[in-house]
Image (cartoon, helix red, strand yellow):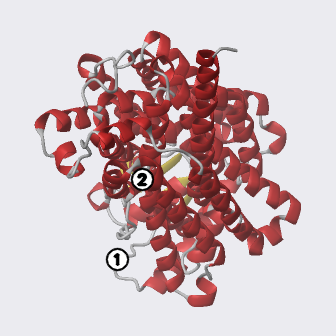
Amino acid sequence: MDHATAARAALRRDERRVVFASALGTTFEWYDFYLYGALADIIGRRFFAELDPGSGFIFAMLAFAAGFVVRPFGALLFGRLGDMIGRKYTFLVTILLMGMSTFVVGLLPDYASIGVAAPIILIAVRLLQGLAVGGEYGGAATYVAEHAPRHRRGAYTGWVQTTATLGLLLSLALTLGLREALGAAAFEDWGWRLCFLVSLVLLATSIWIRLRLPESPAFMRIKREGRISKAPLTEAFGYGANLQTVLLALFGLTAGQGVVWYCGQFYVLLFLTQTLKIDGVTAGLLMGVALLLTMPCFWLAGALSDRIGRKPVILGGLAFAVVAYFPAFHALAAAGNPQLAAATARTPIVLVADARGCAFQFNPLGTTRFDSSCDIARQLLAAAAVDYAERDGRGLARIRVGRDVIPVFDGKALPDAVYASTLQQLQARLARALRAAGYPARADPARIDRVRIVLLLALLSADVALVYGPLAAALVELFPTRIRYTSLSLPYHIGNGWFGGMLPTIAFALVAEHGNIYQGLWYPVAVAALSIAVALPWLPETSRRDIYAHD
């Protein structure tokens, strides 16, 4: 082997080590972040014990959303550091912050032990996790892309794009495995904490791996030339040309990608468990199989974008979401809980309420109590995941289930304790009426078409790969090296953290507003369509771009 061939082989080994180490560390970080979502039902009962179970789950999901809200601020903080001191050391800090925050959740006393301090500390930890994730992705994507060969940048960063799905899969596998090994009672009592405590081992592994990595060659180049930005935030967002590119990246790429990712791999899991009432273990296993089948698609989509361009692959995935989401979710309902569809057709539900007393129940911070008679009725029906028609009527709201008419109280003047007790009684009465009318409390395991569900979930996950696989390369290629970390991190985390992370909350509000279990899908469909409308005429094709040319 001649010297040139040996040098190329050594370079390829170094590139593979960079990709492997970056992807492995990012996988662990996504595992930490999505573990909370996988355990949201238990966390709701443990840390929001003063609320009824339905409200506790909703508040647990709001605490989950809190981590998304602060992600753009983490992008600004760590993006600035990454452009000033380097990629390597910045995402060492982010993984340390994430790992320790996750470990603390495993030790945190619950509401029964320390009262209201428990949910407050939990939310504070979620905020720290959100800040850490806000700095992690931009660092990993930038670092790998700046090491990658020009003609294989999509394929190399495609491995980084796989890590979010792999982290979700890892969190599902560990929670389901421990639940099976320990038994449901022991897992809910103390076993769930092990999922968080094991993050300390993952943290130590990730730090050891990342300490062995070299700094990005692109960053070292501008450092040698004395061109490191002294004010990355000002350069990234204070000047018209780069700010315009940031906005284009947000509305043309990351907003659409955010809703597609969270719809196809997170909201769909909530749809299976909360709407179709498939038990969590079964739903998690079905989702896990689908994720295993489609994980290679992220790399394939990135590699395909190297050949035909980033834009056709990403826009194709967005277009598929626009046209396929409603049929796909209807097919999931038919396969997962056919009794629900039969009951809906046989015994329609009607809500009679004064429309003037109804509010749009978007409450991302959990600070508003929707307690009018109409709002309470809508919340109950949305939480029960049943379709209903709405009729205008004066006085207190009434829910008609067949011949059973259930009056709904007005909670505006009630003290919290009385409100919670009255709401529980009303929930119990509604549940009895639904059972009597043939609405299933749980999906019948014998009637679940598992093969069909896996295929549908795999189809949705493969669509996520089309949009997400080439994204890191496209974002890196849009911005100059000196402000790249900062410039791409903010639109990515607004698109994912706000547009994507708010999907469950907005979807719940839409379902409650319109009385249809599929209404929440209008949100991801509309945002995906917006991204197509922005990207099609204005987004440049970047796959042939030299990322050093406009430094």
**Discs 1/2, front:** 2
Q: Is residue 45 above or below residue 169?
A: below
- Amino acid identity at mark 1: Lys
Q: Could you say where residue 451 lies in the image, as x and y percent from the top left?
A: 78, 29
Above or below — where is 49 with respect to 307?
below
- Within-10-Å neighbours for mark 2: few <14, some 14–19, many 20+: many
Q: Nearer the viewer, residue 344 or 371?
A: 371
User: In this view of the protein, can residue 397 be seen by the observer?
Assistant: no
Relative horizontal placement of residue 110, taking residue 137 as reference (left or right) = right
Picture coordinates of residue 56, whole percent (x, y): 55, 69
Q: Which residue is drawn at 66% across and 27% down?
A: 296
Residue to which mark 1 is pinned: 412
Q: Quadrant of the N terminus?
A: top right
- Looking at the rendered structure, the secondary structure element under dot 1 is loop
- Image quadrant in which you'd find residue 207: bottom right
Residue extending farthest to the front is: 3
Q: Residue 480 at x, y = what percent?
A: 28, 33
Residue at disc 2, secondary structure: helix
Spot the residue most to the bottom: 114
Question: Residue at 59% across / 74% down in the picture?
Answer: 104
Which image quadrant is residue 10 in? Answer: top right
Task: Quarter of the image for the C terminus: give it.
Answer: top left
Give the residue at mark 2. Answer: 135
Q: Residues within 10 Å of mark 1 (few under 14, many from 20)?
A: few
Q: Which amino acid does label 2 sit on?
A: Gly
